[in-house]
Image: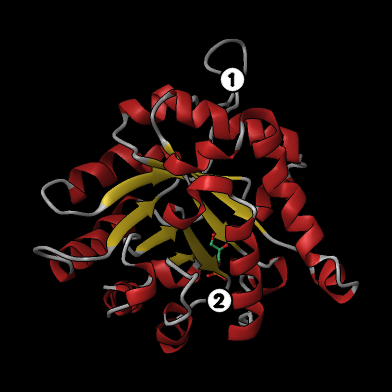
Amino acid sequence: MNKTSNAKRRQLVVGNWKMNGNQQLNAELLAKVVAGWQGEHQAEVVVCPPSPYLLPAFEKISGSSIMLGAQNLSQYDSGAYTGEVSAQMLAELHCKFVIIGHNERRRLQGETDEQVAQKFMAAQRASLIPILCVGESSAQREQGRHLDVIGAQLKAVCSQVGCDVFANAVVAYEPVWAVGTGKTATPQQAEEVHRFIRSQLGEVAETVRILYGGSVKASNAEQLFAIPDIDGALLGGASLDADEFLKICKAAD
Ligand code: 13P
C-alpha cells in the first residue's frame, strides 16, 4: 500500500497478545505468522507475548524480520521490586519494543501519567523503543474532553524530558471504549485524534509513528491505514489469529 503523505514513516503492526497463549499455542501461531511473512517488507511487524514467553518467541521468530516487544516494564532499573521486570532484562531477552501505559494497566493497575512517563524513560535508557498508549474513556469523549486527556498523557512525558524523546518512540492511540469491544473509532474520530497527537510532538512530530488500536480487524484495517496520520496498528484479539494478523500486516505493507 502506498501513502505519499508519510513516506518518511514505515508502517508498523504490533500484536499485543495480552495474557493469552501457552507454549504450544504460541509455537503454532508463530510458525504460521513466520511462514506468512517471509522476505522483504515495507511494513514492520512486532509481536508482544507475555514475559515468560519472550525467549521462546524470539527463538521462533529469529531469522525472520518479525521483531519482539514486551507488554510492560518497571520504571526502576534494578532493586527490591518483587515481581517486576526491568528494561535491561527485556533488552537482554532481545526485545526491541515495549508497550507503555496500556489502558488496561492504567485502569486495572492504577498506573498514573507520571509512572507511565518514568517507564517511558526507563525503556529508552535500555535502548528499547517505547510504544506509548494514550486514549480517552467513553465518558471523557462524551464530555468532549478526549483531546485534553490525550494532551495530558503526552505532556506527562514532554514536560519531564522534552518532546524530542519521541524521535525514538511510537505513540498508539487506543480509545478505551474501542478496546476489545468490537467498536472502532470512525475514520473521522481517528483522524482528528491522530492529527492532534502529531501536533503535540514538537519538532520530531513528522517522523513519529502513531498507531491506531481498538478492535482493528482485517475488514477495517485498509480504511484505517488510508488515513495519512495513521502509521499502523496496535492489535489485541486480531493478533492471536495468524490469518487475521497476516492480513492486517499485508494491508499495512
Ligand atoms: P483489541 O484489538 O482486542 O480491541 O485490543 C486492542 C488493544 O488493546 C491492543 O493493545
Q: At which x and y percent is residue 214?
A: 58, 71
Looking at the image, residue 90 lies above or below residue 2: above
Q: At which x and y percent is residue 20?
A: 47, 57
Does the CB distance between marks 2 and 1 fall below 8 Å?
Answer: no
* Residue under the image location 41 percent in, 25 percent down: 126
In screen coordinates, is 233 left or right of 56?
right
Q: Out of 100 and 21, give the one closest to the viewer.
A: 100
In screen coordinates, is 141 left or right of 182?
right
Tell me how many marks there are. 2
Question: Which residue in the rendered view is the most extreme toward the right?
Answer: 143
Question: Which residue in the rendered view is the most extreme toward the top?
Answer: 79
Ligand 1 is found in the corner quadrant, namely: bottom right
Residue beneath disc 1:
76
Quick check: can you spot residue 130? yes
Quick check: can you spot residue 107? no
Q: How would you rate the neighbour count of disc 1 (Cα within 10 Å): few for under 14, some for 14-19, many for 20 or more?
A: some
Looking at the image, residue 183 lies above or below residue 238: below
Q: How is the image coloured?
A: secondary structure
N-term-proximal mark, 2 vs 1: 1
Q: Residue flagged by tag 1: what amino acid is it?
A: Tyr
Q: Is mark 2 within 8 Å of ligand 1?
A: yes
Q: Out of 7 and 133, give the one closest to the viewer.
A: 7
Q: CA distance from mark 2 to mark 1?
A: 32 Å
Residue beneath disc 2:
215
Instruction: Tell me the quarter of the picture where residue 35 sits.
Output: bottom left
Q: At which x and y percent is residue 11?
A: 34, 65
Element type at marker 1?
loop
The image quadrant where one finds the C terminus is bottom left
* Residue under the image location 38 percent in, 29 percent down: 127
Instruction: Tell me the quarter of the picture where residue 74 sits.
Output: top right
Q: Residue flagged by tag 2: what amino acid is it?
A: Ser
* Residue under the image location 46 percent in, 23 percent down: 125
